[in-house]
Amino acid sequence: MRSHAYRSLISPLRPQVTPLRLASTLSSRPLSSSAKHPRSKAVPKTIRAVSTIPFIGAFFSSNRNTDSSATMSYPDQRSDDQWRAVLNPEQFRILREKGTERAGTGEYDAHHPSKGVYNCAGCDAPLYTADHKFKSGCGWPAYFDSIPGAVTRHVDNTFGMKRTEIVCSNCGGHLGHVFEGEGYPTPTDERHCVNSVSLRFTEDAPKEPKSKA
């Protein structure tokens, strides 16, 4: 009884929303841009920012399927399992999976001997001599030339940007990239930007590379 009396007391205070009043209320509200164009939804800024990350990552690494280096035949034809048996994980990542070491962290970045040879860390083939090395300040070992026939070049046009990958001619191990026309005072005006992990220095004279079928 009391509950019925209470409802009858407050019911006049509640606003009466009729279908006609509801329709007029909704029609008087301004429509948002998404309501006017339901098919055009704004993309959150965070999603737009994240979508650019794969492109940035691809710029600093080599695409194994964009040039002939993945299918070219080299004298040293060891399988991945055979390479894993002789290389540490970082060497395998760079030499066989075309990775890149961080700038300024390599063993041979600030290494400038008066004589000696830089061999491939995978197959021990001689690649560069101490006379080829120069100070570039780029954060990686830099050479203006290589031992004749020791390095093979492959052009990579990923994302419309021409880059030239360099690999060991004996085993196909990834060394880095070569850049031209940068203005260094060297005989070739080239810079072979090489990962220290891809190299092994020795003071001995160049020797014949090891080949394994």
Image (cartoon, helix red, strand yellow):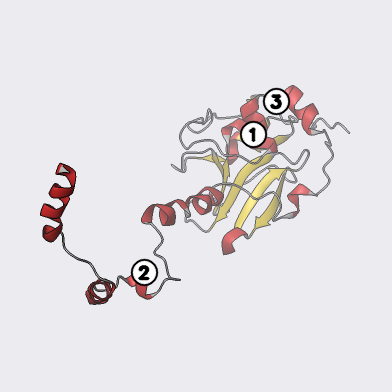
Q: Number of labelled discs?
A: 3
Q: Earlier in the sequence, mark 2 or mark 3?
A: 2
SS class, disc 1: helix
Q: Earlier in the sequence, mark 2 or mark 1?
A: 2
Mark 2–mark 1 CB contact (< 8 Å): no
Image-based side of 206 in relation to 98, left or right: right
SS class, disc 3: loop
- Quadrant of residue 121 in the image? top right
Tell which residue pokes out farthest to the right in this image: 213
For residue 187, above or below residue 212? below
Type of amino acid under label 1: Arg
For residue 40, above or below residue 105? below
Q: Position of residue 24 (x, y in %)?
A: 24, 76
Q: Which residue is mark 3?
A: 87
Image-based side of 149 in relation to 26, left or right: right
Tell which residue pokes out farthest to the front in this image: 1
Type of amino acid under label 2: Ser
Q: Which mark is residue 93?
A: 1
Please report the residue visible at 39 percent of the width from the left and 64 percent of the height from the top. Answer: 42
Q: Quick one: quadrant of the N terminus?
A: top left
Image-based side of 23 in relation to 60, left or right: left
Tell which of 139 and 80 is nearer to you.
Answer: 80
Type of amino acid under label 3: Leu
Between the C-alphas of marks 2 and 3, the distance is 56 Å
